[in-house]
Amino acid sequence: MRIDPVAPADAGGESYTQPEGLLAVPIGRKEKQIQAYYRILFSTWGCQHWWPARTRFEVIVGAYLTQNTAWTNVESALSGLRSARLLNLEGIRQVALPELERLIHCAGYFRQKARRLKTFVAFLDQHYGGSLSKLFSQPTPKLRQELLSLNGVGPETADSILLYAGNYPVFVVDAYTRRILDRHGILPEKTDYEDIRQLFERALNPLAAEALTAKSGEPGAAHRPSVGGAGHPPSRMSTSRRTTVAQVYNEMHGLIVGVGKNYCRKSQAQCDECPLRSFLPHG
Ligand code: SF4
């Protein structure tokens, strides 16, 4: 697995415009607070082992299938594809569209998703000769732009592919991230995706410098099962080589999913039991 040397575009700490709205946490403190979230969640739950997959292509298929559906449904669809020996580039390239739709039916929006997977493979064939290694040797901004131009690929899917399949240092923002920021008075839920991504990358880069990851800690820690959150068993992709900054981004997204799934639910937040309860704004 290659290690991308390209730093995030905002790694130099460019100026940041505060969106309008009720904000309990002033600029500058936001980064510190996000760093504190990482420290407390990582020390509580340990390595989350994202993304659960055996290959880069499996991560890509999972990133498409997980749009608007629960991960358990994605797991069923991936399992069906694997049983049919189609969870690989050649499989998705060759399988007839109706058969692909049938196999991923349980992941929802199966017609859209089947077409989108075919579109991705056609893009890979046309631009990179069907080679994921060539795809993932592109500079971050170029590849991100290309992925975003594909049908059905928004920022969250593009960044999931970059971070979890390509090990690029790009933070993934999801609905849980938005909800936690909003409820803690850091940023309103509707804040632009790029503003949130850049805030997290600015906040997390110093933690990478401190090497606050299991991979950079004691030997064997990266292969130890997580003790909570939304952790998965160690997998070939979760333990693949990546830069420390990509590892911190990888970990933080997994930790946030753990908060969102277990405590910070849309309809009812269970703050009393949440590891982040001490960060709730007064009132
Ligand atoms: S559950 Fe409560 S304490 Fe935990 S992240 Fe959500 S709002 Fe914060």
Image: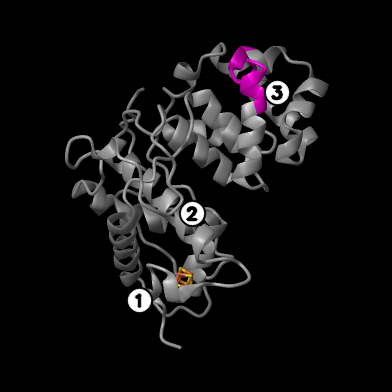
Badge 3 or badge 1: first in the primary sequence: 3
Which one is nearer the viewer's eye here, 18 or 45?
45
CA gap between label 3 and label 1 equals: 46 Å
Residue 217 drawn at (x, y percent) = 18, 42
CA gap between label 2 and label 3 equals: 28 Å
Colouring:
one colour
Near mark 1 (Cα within 10 A), the count class, few <14, some 14-19 or many ≥20, is few
Residue 34 drawn at (x, y percent) = 35, 63
The three-letter code of the residue at mark 2 reads Val
Badge 2 or badge 1: first in the primary sequence: 2
Left or right: residue 265 compared with residue 210: right
- In magenta, the rendered stretch is 80-90
Residue at 51% over, 35% down: 161
Label of residue 257 in the image: 2
Which one is nearer the viewer's eye here, 195 or 78?
78
Q: What residue is pinned by disc 3?
A: 118
Label of residue 278 in the image: 1
Q: Does the magenta stretch include residue 111?
A: no
Examine the image and state in which quarter residue 121 appears. top right
Against 138, residue 282 (above or below) is: below
Left or right: residue 221 compared with residue 123: left
Which type of secondary structure does the marked residue at label 1 adopt? helix
